[in-house]
Image (cartoon, rainbow, N blue to C red):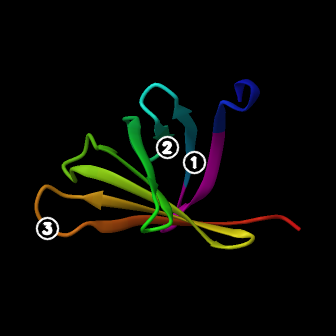
């Protein structure tokens, strides 16, 4: 979008048997030097905003944000797992207790 400044992602899938759609916008903020996202989904009534940086030790883009749900914070980890594959993992980070993975998306490059 806008000459390459932003990337828009549309994901359609199932949560159990229920269909869902989510839209996410990705960009890099040159003022803060952080990656930023905004995500909306048919499964929730709020917008999730995350920001973060590339973690060289993990070899992944790590984004974190606040959740309007009692679950607490969110964390998204996006990493390359092969020359034609990316793995995105989303975690809920509750105020107490261990983070739990709420979603996994595997991206495969088309031939």
Q: Residue furthest front?
A: 56
> How crowded is the residue under tag 2: few (<14 C-alpha within 10 Å), some, or many (20+)?
few
Q: Earlier in the sequence, mark 2 or mark 1?
A: 1
Q: Main secondary structure of the magenta part?
A: strand
**Residue sitting at 71 percent across and 24 percent down?**
2
Within the magenta stretch, is there residue 98?
A: no
Drawn side of residue 56 relative to residue 10, left or right: left
Which is more toward the observer, 49 or 15?
Answer: 49
Chain-order first, disc 3 or disc 2: 2
Residue 62: x and y, percent? 42, 55
How far apart in space, not on screen, are marks 1 and 3 (Cα)? 29 Å
Q: Secondary structure at mark 2?
A: loop
What residue is shown at x 22% (from left), y 53% (from top)?
Answer: 71
- Residue 21 percent location from the top left of the image: 57, 48
Residues under numbered marks 1 and 3 in contact, where contact means CB atoms less than 8 Å apart: no
- Which residue is identified by label 2? 42
Q: Which residue is mark 3?
A: 97
Instruction: Describe the element under mark 3 as helix, strand or loop.
Output: loop
| Mark 2 and mark 1: Cα distance apart in space | 6 Å
Q: Position of residue 20 (x, y in %)?
A: 54, 52
The stretch of residues the image draws in magenta is: 8-19
């Amino acid at each position: 979008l806008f000459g390459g400044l932003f990337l828009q992602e549309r994901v359609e899938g199932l949560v159990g048997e229920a269909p869902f759609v989510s839209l996410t916008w990705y960009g890099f903020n040159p003022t803060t030097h952080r990656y930023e996202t905004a995500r909306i989904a048919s499964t929730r009534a709020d917008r999730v905003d995350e920001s973060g940086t590339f973690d060289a030790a993990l070899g992944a883009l790590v984004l974190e944000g606040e959740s309007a749900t009692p679950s607490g914070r969110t964390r998204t980890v996006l990493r390359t797992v092969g020359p034609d594959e990316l793995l995105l993992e989303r975690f809920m980070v509750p105020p107490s207790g261990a983070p739990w993975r709420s979603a996994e998306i595997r991206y495969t490059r088309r031939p």
